[in-house]
Amino acid sequence: MSNIPTPHISAKLGDFAETVLMPGDPLRSKFIAENFLEGAELVNNVRGVQGYTGTYKGRKVSVMASGMGMPAIGIYSYELFNFYDVKNIIRVGTAGGLREEVKVKDIIMGMACMTNSNWAAQYEINAVLPAVCSYDLLKKAEQAAADLGVKPHIGTIFSSDVFYDSTRDYDKWRSMGVLGVEMEAAALYMQAAKAGKNALCICTVSDHMVTGESCSSDERQTAFTTMMEIALETAIR
């Protein structure tokens, strides 16, 4: 296929599994590959965005980083969905908690995304375009979490284009039931919808936007193993 390799992915066709776990951090991609996958092989390292393919419980699974923000995950998800025949992308990332019932280190599954991004404008649809996950993946992830004894928060998340947000409209977001804020899921969900593929965002709450509680950078990189296990169990179902 003439589109492979892409400007951002050096892998060959067939190097990726049908399901790709996608953390933002390349080091988290490496951690998942080294600690959960058997026979993991590095299939991409363009710009240090590490992608690996191996097996989990005998099933082929891939993991590759997305970098930070919607433009970055938009590039990698587009190329995986449209050029590499990937069917499912599960984002495994971090989020800032917003509501009182959401605690640091809790798991959030994004059923839908609100966003301040103009990402949807490229589709030229004269309507508000909903960014929603794959119900099939969400259902499988909820069951995988239950099997692991975990009760995730499932609902709306906010995908922000801005990390250092000067408005900090936390109360407005909370009033609309938003569980947490992150920076990638809305673009991933819309890319999946356009490609006719499946996407889900599973996040661990790394800090709380209201209480100020937070995890260390080391914990962000390696300690969120429950989220990783849920995603891997979802991938093989």
Image (cartoon, rainbow, N blue to C red):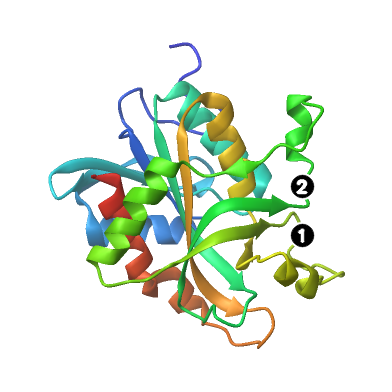
Residue where numbered disc 2 is placed: 117
Q: Is residue 202 above or below residue 45?
A: below
In depth, the one of 32 and 49 nearer the eye is 32
Q: Quadrant of residue 107?
A: bottom left
Quadrant of the frame with the N terminus: top left
Farthest residue toward the right? Answer: 167
Q: Is residue 110 above or below residue 42?
A: below
Amino acid bearing label 1: Val
Seen as rendered, the residue at the extreme top is 2
SS state under label 2 = loop
Dot 2 surroundings within 10 Å: few (below 14), some, or many (20 or more)? some
Amino acid marked by disc 2:
Ser
Report if residue 32 is visible in the image: no
From the viewer's perspective, tell me whether residue 189 is left or right of residue 5: right
Q: Residue at (65%, 75%) from the top-left corner?
A: 98
Name which residue lies at 57% across and 67% down: 95
Residue 132, position in %: x, y?
Answer: 57, 44
On the image, the x and y values in percent for residue 47 come to 54, 44
